[in-house]
Amino acid sequence: MVTPSPFAPLEFLTGFIPLPFTKGEGGRIVSEGLHLFNLLLINQPYGEGLYFLYLVVEWCGQRKTKYVTGVSSIMDFNQLSWGTVCFYYRSAGDNKYSKIMKDTAFLSKLREAPFDISPAEFEEKVLLDHVNIENYDLLIGHNLAQSVLSKIVELHPEVSSLQNVTLLDCELSDSAMTEKLNKVYADLYSIQGLWLTGVSKIAHLLNDKLFAILNLNISNHFGILEGNTNLIHWLRITQQNAEEVTRDFQEQGLSGSPEKYLSGKLGYTSLGYEKPLVKFIDEYFWLCFGDNLPVPPRWVPSYIEES
C-alpha cells in the first residue's frame, strides 16, 4: 500500500511512506503490489532521545531495493507534501507567517540595515505578530524590542556573512561555520525574556533558508533542552531531512525544487513569496510532535494507480 500524494491523481509519487513511529511502536508498510515492506524499529538510543530506524524496502516489479539506516524521523517528499497540506488548513493558510514574509522591504532592512528599524516597528511586526508574545509586562519591563534590535545590530557582521548560505549547502562540519551559527543563537538567547521558540523564530527571519524554527514539543522529542544554546544538533536534523526530501523530489523527476513546487501548489507563490524548505519541514514536525498527528494521516485511503 503506497500512501498517495496529496496532489494525486495529478502526480503518483512512488516509493515508500514510513509513518512516524515512536519508541516501542511497530508497523508495516505494504508495497505497490502485494509485497509487504519489512520494517524493524530497534529501541536503541541515538544521540539524545533518538532511535535507529532500519527499513528494508522491496519495490514490486522493479526489483529495486532502497535502504535508509541509522536515521531518525527522516521524511521523504510525499510525507512532507501531506504535512504542508495539513498545516495549511490547520493554520488557516499560515497567514501570520505569510504576512511578514511578503514584507520584503522590512526583511531586507532587518538583514542589511537593522539600525534603520525603529523599536516600535520591530515590536509590532516581529515580537507581536511573528513571535506572538502576549505578555506586555515582558515587552515593556524588559524593553524587549530595543534589546533584541540592539543584539541584531551587534550580530550584523555574522548575519551578513550568512546571507547567501542555505541549509542544504551549509557545511556543518566546518568549525568556523558552526561558530557563526552558534553565536547567532547564543546571543539572541542571552536576551532576558526571550525563550527557545522566540529565538529560533527571530533567527529564521535573519535567514529563512538557513535557520530552522524550533518549538518546545519538537525540542522535547529530539532531546534539545531549553537552555541549550548549541542548536547545531537541531540544524543537522533539519538538514538531513532537507537532503532526503530534495533527493526524493529529484528522483521522482519533478521540476524545480521542493519548496518552489509546494509554494506553487499551495498558493504561496501567488501571494508574492516562496516558502522556504526549512519552514515546510518545521510544519511537518509541528504536526507530528505538537499535534501528535501522523503524517500522512493513517485514515488516508490508498491511491490505486490506473492501469
Image (cartoon, rainbow, N blue to C red):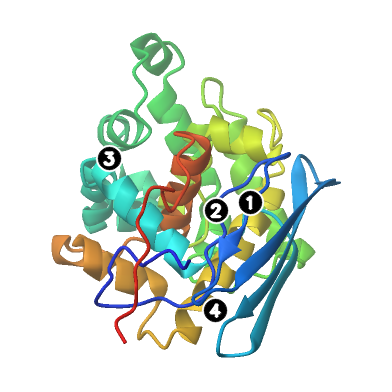
The image shows a total of numbered marks equal to: 4
The span from disc 4 to disc 1 (Cα, nearest Å) is: 25 Å
Disc 2: CA contacts within 10 A as few (<14), some (14-19) or many (>=20): some
The residue under label 1 is which amino acid type?
Gly
**Do the numbered discs 2 and 1 sit on residues whose CB atoms are within 8 Å?**
yes
Between disc 3 and disc 1, the foreground one is 1
Judging by the rendered image, the residue that carries numbered circle 1 is 27
Judging by the rendered image, the residue that carries numbered circle 4 is 247
Q: Is residue 304 left or right of residue 269?
A: right
Q: Which mark is residue 91?
A: 3
Between disc 4 and disc 1, the foreground one is 1
- x and y, in percent, of residue 3 in the image: 43, 63
The span from disc 3 to disc 1 (Cα, nearest Å) is: 30 Å
The span from disc 2 to disc 1 (Cα, nearest Å) is: 8 Å
Q: Secondary structure at mark 1?
A: loop
The residue under label 2 is which amino acid type?
Leu
- x and y, in percent, of residue 135 in the image: 37, 14
Q: Quadrant of residue 191?
A: top right
The residue under label 3 is which amino acid type?
Ser
Dot placed on the residue nearer the N-terminal end, 4 or 3: 3
Disc 4: CA contacts within 10 A as few (<14), some (14-19) or many (>=20): some
Residue plotted at (38% across, 45% down): 115
The residue under label 4 is which amino acid type?
Arg
Judging by the rendered image, the residue that carries numbered circle 2 is 19
- x and y, in percent, of residue 240 in the image: 63, 64
Vertical arrangement, residue 83 with respect to residue 81, above or below:
above
**Do the numbered discs 2 and 4 sit on residues whose CB atoms are within 8 Å?**
no
